[in-house]
Amino acid sequence: MEFQNRCIFLVSLLSLALLGTLNAFKLVDSDSMTHHRITTAAILNITADVCKALAQQEGRDFVLAEDSLSVQNLSEACLFTDSVKAFQTAITVISGRNAWVDLRHALDEEYHFDDESFVRGRRLITRGLAAAKANIKQKNYQAAQLAVGEILHTLQDFYSHSNWVELGNRIAFSTLIRADLNFDNIADINTPTCRNCEGDNCDNNILETVIAEKKITSGYFSLTSSSKPNGKCSHGSSLDRTSKTEPRGGINKDAVDSEHGSLHAQAAQVAVTASSQLLQDIRGAAGDADFLRFLGISRSSTSSGVVLCFVIDTSSGTAGVLAELKRLAASVVSNVSDKPDVYILVPFNETSHGPLKKTSDSDEFLSEINSLSASGAGNSSEPRQSLSGLLLALAEAPSSSEIFVFTSGPPGDSHLESTLTALIENTKSAVNFLLTNLSSVQSGDLYRTLARVSGGQAIEITEQEFNQTLTIVTDALKSAQATLLQVVRNPGAPETFAFTVDASVRTLLVYVTGDSLTFTIISASGVGQRSRESVGRLGTIQKVGNFQTVRLTSPLQTGQWRININSARPYTLKAIGESTIDFFFDFVEVIQHPQPGFTVLNSRPQTGGNASLSVSVTGGSSVKVTEVTLSQVSGTDTVAGAVEQTATGDYLVTLSRLPEGAFSLQLKGENSSSSRASDMLFQRQSSTQLRTSAVAVTAQESGDWRPGSNLTVNFTVATANNAGKTVAIRPTNNRGFAMSYPSSLTLGSGGQAEDKGTIFAPADTPSGTAVTLVIEAVAPSGTDFNYVVMRLAVTAEETDVTPPECESVTVNANCTRNCTLRTWNFTAVVSDGRQGSGVGRVSVREARGTLNTTSLPGAGGFNVTLASFSTSCCSEEVVLVAADGVGNVGTCLIRSGGGGGGHTVSLLLPLWVSMVGLTLVKALHGS
Ligand SMILES: *[C@@H]1O[C@H](CO)[C@@H](O)[C@H](O)[C@H]1NC(C)=O
Ligand SMILES: *[C@@H]1O[C@H](CO)[C@@H](O)[C@H](O)[C@H]1NC(C)=O
Ligand SMILES: *[C@@H]1O[C@H](CO)[C@@H](O)[C@H](O)[C@H]1NC(C)=O
Ligand SMILES: *[C@@H]1O[C@H](CO)[C@@H](O)[C@H](O)[C@H]1NC(C)=O
Ligand SMILES: *[C@@H]1O[C@H](CO)[C@@H](O)[C@H](O)[C@H]1NC(C)=O
Ligand SMILES: *[C@@H]1O[C@H](CO)[C@@H](O)[C@H](O)[C@H]1NC(C)=O
């Protein structure tokens, strides 16, 4: 029931031929478009549009290296090379959630516009669109990505499953994203729409009356029943039983070989346009900067996309450390080379934790930190709510963040260990602990464990050493850092480790954490430096507490480096480099039916089974992944995967089994843009430790979640050979919302059980609030657990669905001669109507100039916005974009009138008919 894949170009054919894995899962070898490709094309298109507009405002040219749009050439043209990885991740999240609709809502007709479910299908879209806008307003970008991925699926299916394209339409149907427009001319239940297909020919099975009256219809679909209303079209395909009864055949355009496959390309093209339009509408509500952040993009001119996240102990007895910490925070903010985009702060003490503070303003962050105070001179060995504080941070920070926890005492909430582990595995964020004045070694054990599984450091320092920790924090916050090697040894033993430094690595840092250890680092050409040489031939070595940083001098020698560690105590080793080549990955669930695709697994993969990984690598089209292996962290078992390229930079890796215990992922590849063959090879590694589980957990929420109401979450657990035994259930959320759920489930004969729980959002929850819910299920043995991490959002009912309008426009233009020497201007009154939520953001597109807005009382007794704009006569038209308080977006096109010569001209032109938020402009002057 979906768009399929199309093998574009030689690249795909070539890669398949090179890899020789033609029998593996194929995402690239069909002639049709998939949801993934449609979604990616739309995201690249809108991003290019935004970037063009920004370039215009900044007075730059927008130049793409190649004609076609790709993540890489867009990032260069748009100056966001540091956030390529986050952008690519956003595309993966959106596209993965799009595919997820086929997994979780395969047979729910409104998700696919099957069975003429137009009104319900549109409701899904407009509801999700409002939710996404509310999420972005709250800076909950991941929640917004998920909402958008979901509704793009339904939107795209409209063009394949309805007769829109058969009616001759080649533009998007904007009614689908506008709750305020009448959705009429739908063929009602009594209107026959199809006749039987003639043999193989199915091109003309839609009735002429339907076409002539421009009635909208869609195909009926069922796997189980052949019945459908009289005379109705079917979806078609071998799976659809309804297509076997009269009128036989189908109308879907999912693939080139579908019943209406001859229109597949047209349908897919309109689906791309419609998807861009939906994104354009979100852009209007969010503004360009936040819209780009929603797509993971921070442009280097403003910030780096890095998040600074501090979780801070304010228990009694921490006054001294807190004073040091305030100094540290101030130095970090003024010294960090890549300005953080978001600052997150979570305080905790013996009796409470939070609230979490999130801001984009460094001064606000510092003043929040400076307002913290330790509650007294108590006993610093008292347990504290450090892990609860960390949980808030992990749930809020974007994936792959570096989080810092500062504490001076043991955790009082160690029951959260498994929940934190779940969030670490799910977000792949690294947790670094700075431990001061710990009263015993044991009190830091859990911190060390969490640091280890996340690939972070547990650094033990004295209060006096605090002033040496600045570089530890600023180093971790550099953008575009990739892990080359990560090793954990517990217990420790002397060992030599090798790692490859490729030509793309601009800086290299090696971290060694552990007590009483010495090491020697040896460059590719055999030059060595010992740990006690703080300044040596290779670089400098800084030691703070149990943590040593080797800062290698650039330019770096490429080739194989070694480090020889001598220690009998536990230690960790990590080599990181600034490089354009990095990667991210997820365990995925591969969907073969109805059409191929995959969606991210928010759980541990199954013990004893096979598994699939989606791997994306940044660095451009010259970068190829050749090898992906999973290796035990403390053991020798290694499993190599079958690597198949699915698109430029994207791979699907299939593994016949997974290692036991904790394992990590290593990736090797070639960068063909290197000049020397010996520099072509690169290696990267995941810093997060991964695990399998013998328990399977799935969960599914139902319906809207409004402030003041419960959300019902159904979940299933399964584990083989355990019938009759019980599985403990443990849900946790990051908002402190009340939950009601069974504490355990008894497994049925198949080793399975299902039940449901509820989570309550208080009435004062702001619309757009993102909630992370982790449901854990503990195996009967008690030693193994699995989880499902759910990203949910609370959204208020949309009461205002009407966009603002331009009520009157006055144009002053006399653009007769050389346009570069002359300007024109206009004044527009923008109103959201009496019932509206009020005019919010107003902006202009397609022109440079100064926009002034003022809010004033309007004639109707409510406030309107007066917008005035002046621009060069060379810009003949301006698009004025106005969003209201809840994100409904209206636009109007205003023209200078070209060579018109009139003193004051009022020009009132509707924007292209399919444009979102089409608004007719009424005249003040001249009417
Ligand atoms: C995006 O798509 C629109 C409509 O299909 C097109 O007019 C526009 O040129 C595209 N933008 C870019 C940058 O390709
Ligand atoms: C912990 O912090 C909370 C909130 O700031 C405060 O009310 C409480 O008194 C503190 N507890 C202790 C033991 O200092
Ligand atoms: C850190 O503070 C100590 C005294 O508390 C001082 O001796 C040392 O020089 C300081 N180091 C730095 C790098 O500022
Ligand atoms: C949740 O389970 C109930 C039965 O307990 C079922 O009626 C409902 O459809 C399920 N909801 C979802 C979204 O699966
Ligand atoms: C939410 O669910 C809880 C537990 O089932 C119940 O006690 C409460 O009344 C529900 N609240 C609302 C507003 O439905
Ligand atoms: C427009 O500008 C030209 C050149 O400055 C001038 O001659 C003409 O009178 C102007 N027309 C009006 C209507 O102001």
Image (cartoon, rainbow, N blue to C red):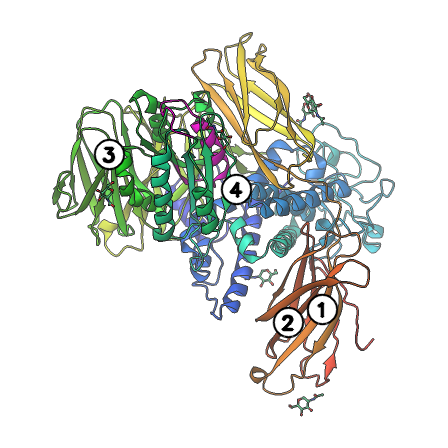
- Foreground mark, 3 or 4, reads 3
Label 1 Cα crowd, 10 Å radius (few <14 / some 14-19 / many 20+): many
**275 over 454 or under it: above or below:** below
Please, what is the three-letter code of the amino acid marked with disc 2? Phe
Please, what is the three-letter code of the amino acid marked with disc 1? Ala
Instruction: Determine contact: label 1, label 2, CB under 8 Å.
Output: yes
Is the shortest distance between ligand 4 and the CB of mark 4 under 8 Å?
no
162 left or right of 19? right
Label 2 Cα crowd, 10 Å radius (few <14 / some 14-19 / many 20+): many
Tag 3 or tag 1, which sits nearer the N-term?
3
Q: Secondary structure at mark 1?
A: strand
Tag 2 or tag 3, which sits nearer the N-term?
3
Ligand 4 - quadrant of the structure image: top right
C-alpha separation, residue under disc 3 versus residue under disc 2: 59 Å
Label 4 Cα crowd, 10 Å radius (few <14 / some 14-19 / many 20+): many
C-alpha separation, residue under disc 1 versus residue under disc 4: 39 Å
C-alpha separation, residue under disc 3 versus residue under disc 4: 40 Å
